[in-house]
Amino acid sequence: MHSVTRIERALRRLNRIPHLTRASWRTATSAIALAIGLTLVTAGPASASFWAPQHGGSPNADRIHTLYAVVFGVGVVIFIAVFGALVYAMVKFRARPGAVAEQLHGNTRLEIGWTAGAAAIVLVLGIVTFLMLPGIRNPDNSDKDGFDVSQYQTAKDKDLLPPNGQSLNIDVNGQQYAWRFTYPDKDADRQNNVQSYEEMVVPTGTTVTLDIRSSDVGHAWWIPQLGGKADALPGYTNHTWFKVPAKALRNDDERENGRVFKGNCAELCGRNHANMTAQVRAVTPAKFQEWLDRQSADLVAAHEAAVKFRQEQQQSDKAEAAAAAAVDSDTTSADPSAPSTDSAAPAGAER
Amino acid sequence: MATVTATPIPQVVAHSVEKPVKGWVDWVTTTDHKKIGIMYLVLTFAFFGVGGVEALLIRLQLAVPDNTLLDFKTYNQLITMHGTTMIFLFVVPVMAGFGNYFVPLMIGARDMAFPKLNALSFWMLAAGGLVFYASVFFNPPECGWTCYVPLASKDYLPNGGVDAWIFLVHLTGIGSLVGSVNFYVTIANLRAPGMTWSRLPLFCWTILTYSVLLILALPAIAAAVTLLLTDRHFGTNFYDPAEGGSPLLWQHLFWFFGHPEVYIMVLPGFGIISEVLPVFARKPIFGYKAIAASTLTIAFLGLMVWAHHMFTTPSPSVVLVFFMVSSMLISIPTGIKIFSWIGTLWRGTIIFATPLLFAVGFLGTFLIGGVTGVILAIYPVDWQLHDTYFVVAHFHYVLMGGAVFAVFSGLYYWYPKMTGRMMDEKLGKISFWTMLVGFHTTFLVQHSIGMDGMPRRIPEYADIGNLAIYNLISTIGAFILGVGILITAINALRSLKHGAVSGPDPWKANTLEWFTSSPPPQNNFDSVPRVRSVEPMKDIRAEIERRNNETKPVSA
């Protein structure tokens, strides 16, 4: 048969011509190299988050970074090996005139080998993970130069505290679209605790444990440089921790005003999700004490002002009620079951 | 007396011959698996186009920091529509489309086991898509494709968008469930003589596994969305913590379905790759049994990894550890598959036709998705990467670079069988290279976007770190990718009229669908030869060649 159909011709042409000419190979590879090069240049070599998560603000973030680097390294080696084999096969075994495909169905020994190899890699990665896991999950003790937290303890599960049982435990509450931070204090009354919104001020060298909650929809607490995320779900309390080392304050300005770590809410929480930001300002323990005192003083002042205002209200209510009762008693004195008008009305109003 | 014997006389009772229905009535009323398959493919590719436009709008919004192109509400609606469309209305049903058309042909059957149920499956899908997209005219959902509670509860999203989403899940779920039973029964009972389980084409193995996974996973999501519906409208409190319910329950039920769903989407893709590679390497598949077994292993493990989507929730360590280990284990059968595919190419004679290019493109991108998958499986690392663009990049490598490249490979491979014409090779290659470059430009840099601190699903970001340049690169890539897809769309439409006539077996392929004409007649096959291996067409061609050689000396 000498007449060939259009398709057979097309297939022959495919067989004969390598799928890419040398020139187009060169163009393609140089285009890719240029793209990668441009990305690297514009990204700047200083940017560590180009290939790995951010870190540098807390030991657990640093350890996650290390674990990531190990897994990433293994992944790159596997990728290069497998992708290399693929590219080699594509170039070496492309259809050429006279080449015959080897009709082989498998190779049991080889197949068992690569299954075992894959299993071994997974095993190694698992062991590395389990070795590094406690350091990431469990809080460290505070540093010696940290803030003295011994008088600010709140009852908490021992597993969620550092080995010495002492941390600055801050209650983090997510709500559309802001975070509220409640600090511990020396008494059991939760009403008079220092609170702040948007910005959490923490002392350096001190282990901070967080109780994360939500009062409406799901949110996620995440400050990349201080470690991983923790979801805030209504009805649940989630936990994480961080410790900003004293040396994280890199210059005089930061030692004076603190260093700010920023983050976004990481769980879709509604239309304004993108603007639900959080930041942590790490200051020296002395500055933190100042801040805490100032907040407490403000709180006390506000409380006193409120109490004073309430008392004034109460007194004016009383005066009004007495005046009203005076009028009342003239008209209803015939009824024996009427309450003695002296205190009932204002007390009821206050309740 | 002569008696008249009444002899029965046959009578014609039909008053008219039924006219063959033509045109759109034929399409609407058909129960032919091939026509239903075509309708599946046309509808799902249309949704792919719509979902793609939504993706481009999302990328346009993110092209520059603090962009004000879209408002927050529209943006949330777009991400919800994009995710839901691509998953429920494209990747899952497009596999059902290929399955519908090719499973009966590959196993030598004349139709699916239950042709009318098959039509029901399709129309349920169409109804689900219609209900969902009808919400465009009032208020599309804005809770993301996962619709996490309490955000999706009536307190926070009282409008009907979430309900449209719920009905989409119900309707497409019924369609998939019915379709899955149909696939299972078809493959179990209608195989050609001699086609034992160990001679079943690998694509059919993956469709079988796809069906089993759907049957196991769909009831969980059906229950979950029904509870959400009653929470929203009938005063129940399954998900309300203030009334003793739990938002975590939603996440467990959703991901009990949601993770198997990932394998539901990629396994048939694996099947397409396993069919395409041997044909274009001119070599049998390497390790048939290992590939079939790893498909089943992935499905089994895939049912036990759902909580790796919940590593940042308040869950006990033992739960996190279990799901980390099970997730890491999946990399073993997946690795076996990738190695076997490279083994299939090894020492072959590779023909670089478009289906092979897409299959190899799949291998490379899926490999990256697999490596980042292992990184994400390690839960302390996931604490940093969860819900960031790193995850977005990861699942697009698996679903777009993986499943969708496989679908394109299948499209170029099977198009001649479905239409009788070849797609244009030159346009196909241009489309492939454009898509490959566009895909990696879009998504490779998204890993860095995530590690630079950008969470998913935010409509605007501040100009900090390198986010501005990374996002711009990603947006440019998305448009290149869009052009690549458009070229294939043009190619497919153009080739309907202008493509070279393909004949029954243009690729010299291995499986039975190439034994019949292109497109196949309504009954598929007049007779099916006995199947003697996993590559029946190769046997048939060899047999024909043998007989030709035998008869030649005689006739000479």
Image: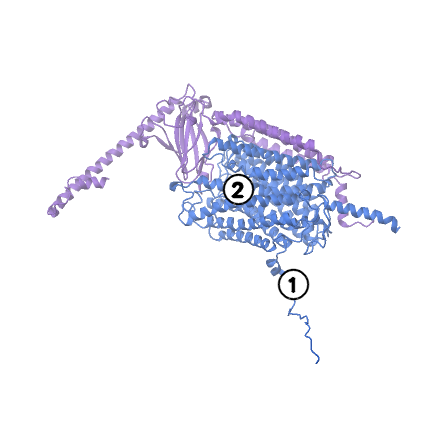
Chain colours: A purple, B blue
Answer with mark 2 or mark 1, whichever residue precedes in sequence. Answer: 1
Q: Which residue is drawn at the image coordinates 36% and 24% (left, top)?
A: A289
Residue tagged 1: B20
Instruction: Give x and y (percent) for residue B183.
Output: 61, 48
Asked if residue B234 is positioned above or below residue B319 in the image, the reply reads below
Relative placement, left or right, of A256 versus B345 is left
- Residue type indicated by callout 2: Gly
Q: Nearer the viewer, residue B218 or A298?
A: B218
Q: Element type at marker 1? A: loop
Instruction: Give x and y (percent) for residue B397.
Output: 59, 38
Q: Nearer the viewer, residue B459 or B7?
A: B7
- Quadrant of the image containing the C terminus of chain A: top left
Labels 2 and 1 positioned on one and the same chain: yes
In this view, which residue lies farthest toward the bottom? Answer: B1
Asked if residue B351 is positioned above or below residue B517 in the image, the reply reads above
Q: Which residue is drawn at the image coordinates 79% and 39% (left, top)?
A: A97
Hey, which quadrant is residue A77 in on the image? top right
Q: Element type at marker 2? A: helix
Q: Chain of mark 2?
A: B
Relative placement, left or right, of B81 versus B10 is left
- On the question of residue A132 being in view, the answer is yes
Q: Nearer the viewer, residue B237 or A292?
A: B237
Residue tagged 2: B258
- Residue type indicated by callout 1: Pro
Relative placement, left or right, of A200 versus B168 is left
Relative placement, left or right, of B80 versus A170 is right
Q: CA distance from mark 2 to mark 1?
A: 43 Å
In this view, which residue lies farthest toward the right? Answer: B556
Q: Nearer the viewer, residue B480 or B547?
A: B547
Instruction: Give x and y (percent) for residue B395.
Output: 56, 39
